[in-house]
Amino acid sequence: MITNETHQPKIVSKATFRTEFIAGLSTFLTLSYIFLLNPILLSKTGINISAAFFATVISAALSTLLMGFWARLPFAVAPAPSITTFFVSYVCIKLGLSWQAALSAVVLSGLLSIVMTYLSVRGKLIESISPGLRSGVLFALSGFLIANGLTQAKLFAYSEGFLDFSKFSFSIPNTIVLLVGLLTTLLFRIKRIRFSGAPIIGIVVASIVASYFGIKANSKAEFSSDMFSSIGNLDFSTLLDERFLLSMLVFFIIDFFGGVGKYIGLFAAMDNKARELEEKNIGRALYVDGIGNIIGGILGASSLAVFVSSAVGILAGGRTGMTAIVTAGFMLLSLAIIPLVGAIPVEVTSGILVYVGCLLIPYDALFDKVHRNFTRFDLAVSVAAAIISFTTYGIDKAILLVFLVYTGQIVLKGARREDLTLIVTTLLLLAAVVAQSLL
């Protein structure tokens, strides 16, 4: 039960502020790489890299401040590499939507998420969604990210919707850059070192190696009026296009269902404090998710999500919104590194994408020997989703498989009223995928 006292502003003691400050800095370090990675990825769609960097920083800072001041939770919000990769590689490059239309789809997915939260649908799903469905979506994202990392390194290529082994190209420089980025990140994450900012170290070291091989960036980021060129640059003219509807729906599903596991894990990490806050504050956090997508879409940063790496700050002692506020402050300070962003070639991000793809795999579910909520059947579906996502570069097909399997189970067992949202979402996703395949 939440008392009124819990929600009144409190004077933070020096000791508490010190703890929350360190927690906020720790959280920032775990996600700071996104301010290098996200603009580089977005620039592939035609968005000016300076604008992409500005939008990434500002949208993340505003959303995280909202999480701190309003939801009063120690969670950070920023563009997730998994969703940005889908935005760039699938929506803009594969489907052919303009980045302006893709940003419009992000905005509408955020509005849809807010509506579903207002109707209490999403909150109920957090308690009722099956581990198999949640895991399947994460595996689909993982397969897609790993495939994108290898493609970014120009090792793999796809033709007519499938992995084309005849176009496999082993490039020694690109392979070395990928491995250096991946292995450096893993090295700084081992138990003895456990440096929160490991991904950004991986990017820096891989950039040095890329420079040695003569791999250079194609774009330049700088302080100029171009920083504001993506703000409000939306295009709803393709609103009824099958590609637009499919993109909006997948953005919504990744945020709506993919965020469920993150919130469960983050609240669990807060232990007893979670029981005091969960009743009211989780509802506000879910609203921040949707609002973050709208902010990200309007500014030009793609879709935003709560970062599961916020758990690092929680483990450092962060328990209140002060942690998120401190994190947002460091985000704003990162505006000073804008000249560095344009100096990093896109190949450098390949190892980090593979790292994040592996990180998304829900290992806790795979090795749950206590509750055994995750069965061999769930594992088979999840692995199949990852394989489909990897071999077809079609995350929509992988997610559709997961939804069809678990919705089919529900229908066969006898659907209840609370299952209607899942059934309708599955039907919409099926219709969108089929329509897009007929284009």
Image (cartoon, grey):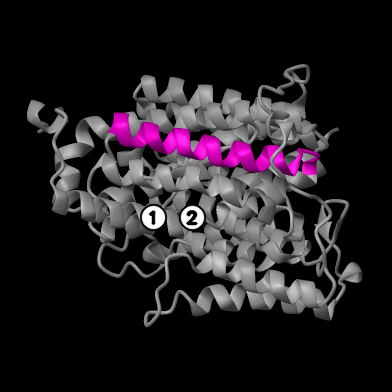
Q: Amino acid at mark 2?
A: Leu
Q: Quadrant of residue 227?
A: top right
Number of dots carrying numbers: 2
Q: Which residue is mark 2?
A: 31
**Left or right of residue 357, residue 193 in this image:** left
**Left or right of residue 48, residue 126 in this image:** left
**Left or right of residue 60, residue 37 in this image:** right
Element under disc 2: helix
Q: Which residue is mark 1?
A: 27
Residue 112: percent from the left, percent from the top? 51, 23
Is 68 within the magenta? yes
Residue 166: percent from the left, percent from the top? 91, 70
Depth order, front residue of 200/279: 200
How crowded pointer 1 is (Cα within 10 Å; few <14, some 14-19, many 20+) is rated as many
Q: Amino acid at mark 1?
A: Thr
Gap in angstroms between the C-alphas marked 1 and 2: 7 Å
